[in-house]
Image: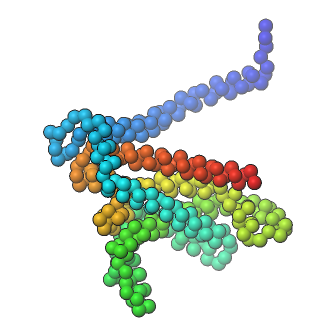
Amino acid sequence: MTTRSPAADAAKREKAKRAPAKWLLAPAVIFLLVWMIVPLGMTLYYSFRNYNLMMPTMTGWAGITNYSILFTDPTFWSALKVTLLIVLCSLIITVGFGLAFALLFHRNFFGRGVARTLAVAPFFVMPVVTGLIWKNMLFHPAFGLLAWLFRLFGATPIDWLAHFPLTSIIIMISWEWTPFAMLVLLTGLQSLPEDQLEAVRLDGANKWHEFRHIVVPHLGQVLYVVVMLESIFFLTSFAEIYTTTSGGPGTATTNLPYYIFQGTFAQYDIGTSSAAAIGAVILANIFAIFLIRFVAGNLNAGENR
């Protein structure tokens, strides 16, 4: 006859206590699964069917016809290119400026609280309002602030949304999301142990070495979170485009969300739009996997040094 050790009995009792807690989480998990899987399943279903609201008699199974139409549409590939440009450029700008502002506001100076509040303010502006502010108050070629500054210095004002539409969209999105990166990175900086900084300073390290070998490795996980969250939101950028350029001129600022919107609400082609939505989901997952491997590889390399 074998006797169980007290440690085994304690582990068994602990496991028995945790079992009911798992069942309490079941409703929330089921709700989230239904919330995600049902819309995705319906989108996948309609992507294989003929479904146009303007032609209700044309129904039935379409197979891969919607995907064939999608992949032979040059506007789709242009929208894919625009989407990737918006994501990559906005990530570089927001993370770069967010880190710079975080380092600045981590220092003590007079009026830091007020300056932090003003720096964070753009993040709380709704995307539609952001588009209207930049379109009518800043980028307007006749009444905008930038036009006034150009005329003040004797230069000709620029119609930004007409001549540099994609750059204008990237500026708007970056202005709106730089405070988010700053807030998260500033939180990471505040958890940096001061004794590490004092140790490297005593060893004769300059500011660059301190930033490169202490600050950046410490912010590795925080940077990973910022990049992942911002990538998700940048892939779904819509309101700024809708309120300013409407995807134009031509298709210069038509990204995947706006392409899907046009197919659904302008052409009423639910089948092809659903196929484009599935393509956007696949793109988001590919982008996420790439970022995870890239950031994780850099973090591992930094830890091994």
Measured as percent of width and height from the top left, residue 281 is found at 42, 46
Measured as percent of width and height from the top left, residue 125 is found at 43, 65
Q: How is the image coloured?
A: rainbow
Describe residue 131's horizontal placement relative to residue 175 as left or right: left
Relative depth, front residue between 283 and 114: 283
Measured as percent of width and height from the top left, residue 267 is found at 22, 52
Q: Residue at x 40, y 48 (%)?
A: 280
Looking at the image, is 233 positioned above or below residue 39?
below
Relative depth, front residue between 72 and 37: 72
Describe residue 8's horizontal placement relative to residue 123 as left or right: right
Which quadrant of the structure image shows residue 39?
Answer: top left
Residue at the farthest front position: 72
Q: Residue at x 54, y 53 (%)?
A: 228
Q: Residue at x 23, y 41 (%)?
A: 51
Q: Residue at x 57, y 48 (%)?
A: 292
Relative depth, front residue between 182 and 26: 182
Which quadrant of the structure image shows residue 216?
Answer: bottom right
Looking at the image, is 100 positioned above or below residue 304?
below
